[in-house]
Amino acid sequence: MRTERFTFTNDGDELVGVLHLPEGEPLAAVVTSGPLTSVKEQAAGAYARAMAERGFAALAFDHRTFGESQGQPRQFENPFGKAQDIRRAVTALLTDERTRELPVAAVGVCAGAGYMARAVADDPRIRAFAGVAGYYSDTADAPPSPEAIARGRAAEQVWRDTGVAEMIPAVAPDGGDVGMPLREAYEYYGTSRGAVPNYTNGFAVQSFAYTSEFDTIEAAARLAVPYVMVHSEHALAPAFARKFYATVPSPKSELWLESVGQIDFYDDPRLIDAAADAAARLFRSVLTREQPETPRFDGHR
């Protein structure tokens, strides 16, 4: 496997990624998207590497306002904008000389699975989709907080008026006023385990106006490509995952794994390998001339 710099633009902003290439001719191109506030050197990169090891050209990139990519305000988590970033990444893959002859599939991790679902539902060029430990937000069963939305809108108005974005930490040891209050999130992003140099521990407050209102169930109902869901009873919101899966009308399969929690899906080789194997089986069956038995997973592995 080798890696090469990969850049593209969205609304005038340059996005920076890493293209992971297998030793031989790639079977297909895979675009990845990772968890809330994450960068390409974290979970998205781990899955891109795993897919390259399985014969795919796989792209991990920094979404707008994060990492090496441009965009203002910094650390602005906008699910709708991230789904658009993914579609622009697909355009780039289909026009770049390294990947333009390849069909495209998608892998989303945690919040990135929800963003990816929206992108896949909106973009028929993406021909298969794997969601890993997905956080599938459901505004019907978990209505957004009016206070969070109001706080986000107020912060956005200040930014538009002054150019100053209110910022809070993404994680902190004792939680509190942060973007991700789970202690498990701090143990990844707030320690050497996941705090890579390209990562910034920050969350633009105006993000609340967008993350609160983002719904994945409407995207699930519009999915028209084969889908595999990899999840765990100890990952985030398994009930939401089951509802998302039940709503998907296209050919689908599911793999339930044993995990400690959510975050070990980001860096535990056992979980990454099992999830990447499931994605690779699906992608080979859909995107290449190889026609193995359609993968169907039941129970725990």
Image (tube, grey):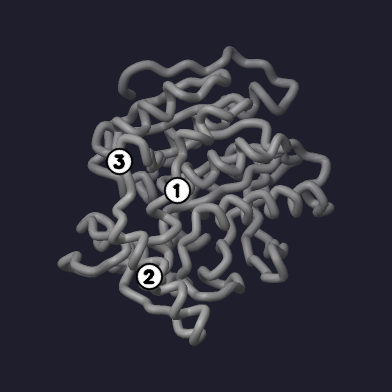
Relative to 36, residue 102 above or below: above
Spatial CA distance of label 3 from label 2 is 20 Å
Q: Residue furthest top?
A: 293
Counting every numbered tag in the picture gives 3
Name the quarter where the C terminus is drawn. Answer: top left
Residue bearing the label numbered 2: 205
**Residue at disc 3, secondary structure:** loop
**What amino acid is labelled 3 in the image?**
Ala
In depth, the one of 83 and 134 nearer the eye is 83
Q: Amino acid at mark 1?
A: Phe
**Horizontal and vertical percent for residue 222?**
58, 29
Q: Which residue is mark 1?
A: 214
**Residue 47 image point, x, y percent:** 50, 46
User: Height in image: 87 above or below 152?
Assistant: above
Res. 127 visible in picture: yes
Residue neighbourhood size for the residue with mark 2, other residues' Cα within 10 Å, grouped as few (<14), some (14–19), many (≥20): many
Say whether residue 184 is left or right of residue 55.
left
Instruction: Please report the residue visible at 42 percent of the width from the left and 50 percent of the height from the top.
Output: 213
Residue located at (67% from left, 24% from top): 286
For label 1, the crowd category at 10 Å Cα-Cα, with few meaning under 14, some 14 to 19 and many 20 or more, is many
Q: Quadrant of residue 63?
A: bottom right
Residue at image coords 78%, 47%? 94
Q: Tell me which numbered mark, 1 or 2, is placed earlier along the sequence.
A: 2
* Residue topped by disc 3: 142
| Secondary structure of residue under mark 1 | loop
* Above or below for 52 versus 249: below
| x and y, in percent, of residue 210 in the image | 45, 57
User: What residue sits 70% from the left and 66% below the top?
Assistant: 11
For numbered disc 2, what is the local secondary structure? helix
